[in-house]
Image (cartoon, rainbow, N blue to C red):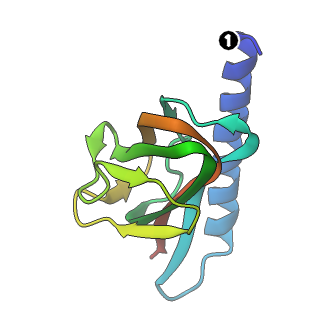
Amino acid sequence: MSGTDMTAVVASLQALNVLVARIEQLLEPTTPTTLASSYAVTWDSNTTVAGDTISFPPFPWASGTITAASYFTNGSATPSFTFAVKINGTVVTGLSAVTVSSATPATTTATGANALSLGAVISLVISGISGSPSDGAVGINFTRSWT
């Protein structure tokens, strides 16, 4: 996929997120509500996890909080990798160097620097690859508020 094609895909995802946020505003309840949601990255059994920074489209809701990250991996040769979660380039406390080395799903709690606002960019930074991790996932869990 060319850089132009990727730019078009990202622009489409951003437009879709804005549309979803607007629809949710129209359906907004009359009392404050907090909803749980997540962004996820997955790798199938044919894809080896590689060092990368994956940025999600800008946060389309007024406010939120990253609460935790859930993760697992499979693969071969004692597979593992490390990840960090960032908001606008700042590492979320508690999610700065999480090692993924088991096929059993696990969760690590975010403990600070985890507030989200409209337009915030959440990034997943993957590093420290060992063995051949594959067939895994990292989910960034967050709440978002309607007020």
Q: Residue 42 or 48: which is nearer the viewer?
A: 48
Q: Residues within 10 Å of mark 1 (few under 14, many from 20)?
A: few
Number of marks in picture: 1
Q: In this rendering, would 34 be left or right of 115?
A: right
Q: Residue 58 or 97: which is nearer the viewer?
A: 97
Q: Which quadrant of the figure has residue 27? A: bottom right
The residue at the far front in this view is: 77
- Residue 9's place in the image compared with 108, above or below, is above
Q: Residue 32 or 140: which is nearer the viewer?
A: 140
The residue at the far bottom in this view is: 31
Q: Residue at x 58, y 53 (%)?
A: 73
As helix, strand or loop, the secondary structure at mark 1 comes to helix
In the image, what residue type sits under mark 1?
Gly
Which residue bears the numbered disc 1? Answer: 3
Query: Where does residue 71 sit, x and y in percent of width and height?
Result: 52, 60
Residue 121 seen in this snapshot? no
Quarter of the figure that contains the C terminus: bottom left
Query: Where does residue 141 sit, x and y in percent of width and height?
Result: 49, 65
Query: Where does residue 106 sit, x and y in percent of width and height?
Result: 48, 69
Q: In this rendering, would 117 be left or right of 92?
A: right
Q: In this rendering, would 48 be left or right of 32?
A: right
Q: Residue at x 46, y 66 (%)?
A: 142
Quarter of the figure that contains the N terminus: top right
Q: Residue at x 46, y 35 (%)?
A: 129
Residue 105 seen in this snapshot? yes
